Amino acid sequence: MFLKSKDITVVRKGGSTLQFPDIEVGHDDSVLLLGASGAGKTTFLSVLAGLLRPNAGQVLVDGGDFYAISSSKRDQERGQKFGFIFQTLHLLPSLTLRQNIALAADMANVPLQNERLEHLLKTLGLVDKADRKPDALSQGEQQRAAIARAVLLRPQIIMADEPTSALDDDNANSVMDLLEAQAKESGAALLVATHDNRIKGRFKTIINLESQVREAA
């Protein structure tokens, strides 16, 4: 089992408490975290990825307590084992598409494999856009670039936060096809957080995050 969580609790500013179900994600699993706005989907992803220390509970990565190691070691493991696609894509406007994708290797402090980068550009239909900056790309091209950056290092898990919620049916299906294909090619698990019920049928495991919030007394 690659990723497990136990008894995760997060206290928000203002005092409300988020309590999350325990999850287990194997190396070839596809898991959907489904919930309305405010249910804590992004918070839970951030905890699982080692970006937000919970107030209680454990996150286990390859059997080890992810928050028991130093923050620098956790950053290194995240960079090498996790591919994260944020709701806001976080492409740097001053860098070209190719440079934005290559940034994943730099952040993880590992050598860039140019063959892998060029393969992704070709696979995702971005070769002719590789030297353009984000503001010269369509939203779909930016999203494909974000996917390429997330899978560049062949992560063990791909995490995506609301990848389809702002898209029409055709584009939503295209993005999910890309995520599933890249997860399969990389041998990675896929963990998606969304309120988009259209994609439920694509997942082996669905975890509903409704009613996880307890308001402060």
Image: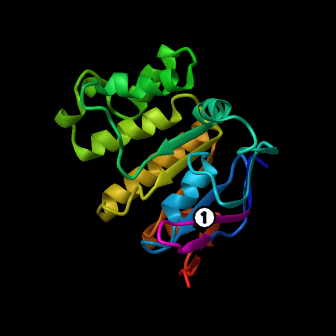
Q: Is residue 98 above or below residue 70?
A: above
The answer to whether any part of residue 191 appears in the image is no
Question: How many numbered discs, if any?
Answer: 1
Residue found at x 33% / y 36%:
91
Name above or below for residue 175 compared with residue 77.
below
Relative image position of residue 9 (x, y in whole percent): 65, 66
The outermost residue toward the left is 136
Q: Residue 14 in magenta? A: yes
Return the residue found at the far right: 63
Residue 2 in view (yes/no) = yes
Quarter of the figure with residue 7: bottom right
Q: Classify mark 1: helix, strand or loop.
A: strand
User: Is residue 157 positioned above or below 153 on the image?
Assistant: below
Q: Is residue 8 magenta?
A: yes
Tag 1 residue: 10
Label 1, residues with CA under 10 Å away: few <14, some 14-19, many ≥20: many
Where's residue 141, x and y in %? 29, 40
Answer with the quarter of the image where residue 154 lies: top right
Q: Is residue 163 left or right of residue 200?
A: left
| Image color mode | rainbow
Find residue 99 and report its horizontal and vertical position in percent.
35, 22
Q: Is residue 65 above or below residue 93?
A: below
Magenta stretch: give its range: 7-18
Residue lying furthest bottom in this view? Answer: 217
Residue shown at the point (32%, 30%) measured from the top left: 126
Quadrant holding the C terminus: bottom right
Which quadrant would residue 82 be assigned to in this image?
A: top right
**Residue 139: horizontal and vertical position, in percent?**
25, 46
Could you tell me which residue is drawn at 53 percent across and 57 percent down?
Answer: 192
